[in-house]
Amino acid sequence: MVGLRPIVEMMTWNFSILAMDQIINGAAKMFYMSGGQMKIPIVFRGPGGAAHQLGAQHSQSLESWYCHVPGLKVVAPSTPYDAKGLLKSAIRDDDPMIFFEGETLYSSKGEVPDGEYLVPIGVADIKREGRDVTIVAWSKMVAVTMKAADVLASQGISCEIIDPRTLRPLDEAPIVRSVRKTNRCVVVEEGWPHSGLGAQVAYIIHRDAFGDLDAPVTRVSGADVPMPYAKNLEHLAMPSPERVIEAVRQVLYLD
């Protein structure tokens, strides 16, 4: 058993709810409770979030649940390049890793090097540079914000998109630097708004860059309801480029 680094695949993260005792009371706490004698190099990975009419029990974004737990590291890549590089880094890490793969991202395409490479845990990425407003998004929401940014660019509005990639530990410095440059911020997340990660990001910005803000931080999230099955209602419950555009225009006091 020495040297093994197990990878546990969830059919979806919705089913991890049944295994939360082992993950939270076992894997997350063993290093602490053993006084640092027992490392837990294990990766829990699988698809998360909505994936087109899977209903309320199979469409949940649970990132904030696992980010709440000390002892876990939480990763949510948005591109093929990041997914491969972060997964390799997660396997090499000595702490238990929660690896969220946006289910509808499996069909996305992007450049991936042939050779070996790693994307470091805990390092954010600037997916798009801009000057007027900062948008913080991760996983599937990066693609949503990129579409919104393209439309806004045609209107003369320049968006900077920050992808944390790792949600715990969260790379706070690039977010704060960006907000100090743009003076405005919109946080986009697929999960529910109450106690969501967007609230944590907003707190960090207000704590470290309050004097730089020209408008309150605005959040775009999933609707605060169980996910509807009906296709039209599911679309309304999810963050969309249109909702991101509306939020950006609000923080710019254009609407």
Image (spheres, helix red, strand yellow):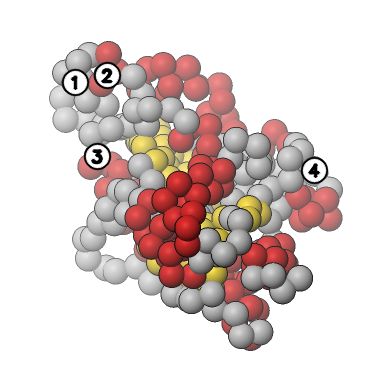
**Residue 214 placement, left or right of 130:** right
* Residue position for label 3: 93
Task: Specify the amino acid type for callout 2.
Answer: Tyr
Mark 1 Cα-neighbour bin, 10 Å: few <14, some 14–19, many ≥20: few
Is any atom of residue 180 visible in this view? Answer: yes
* Residue position for label 2: 32
* Residue position for label 4: 228
The answer to whether residue 252 is above or below residue 142 is below
Mark 2 Cα-neighbour bin, 10 Å: few <14, some 14–19, many ≥20: few
Q: Residue at x 57, y 64 (%)?
A: 214
* Label 4 SS: loop
Q: Are marks 1 and 3 in contact (CB under 8 Å)?
A: no
Percent from the top left, x then y, of residue 5?
Answer: 25, 33
For marks 1 and 4 on the same chain, the one whose residue lies earlier in the sequence: 1
* Label 3 SS: loop
Residue 209: which quarter of the image? Answer: bottom left
**Residue 179 placement, left or right of 49:** left
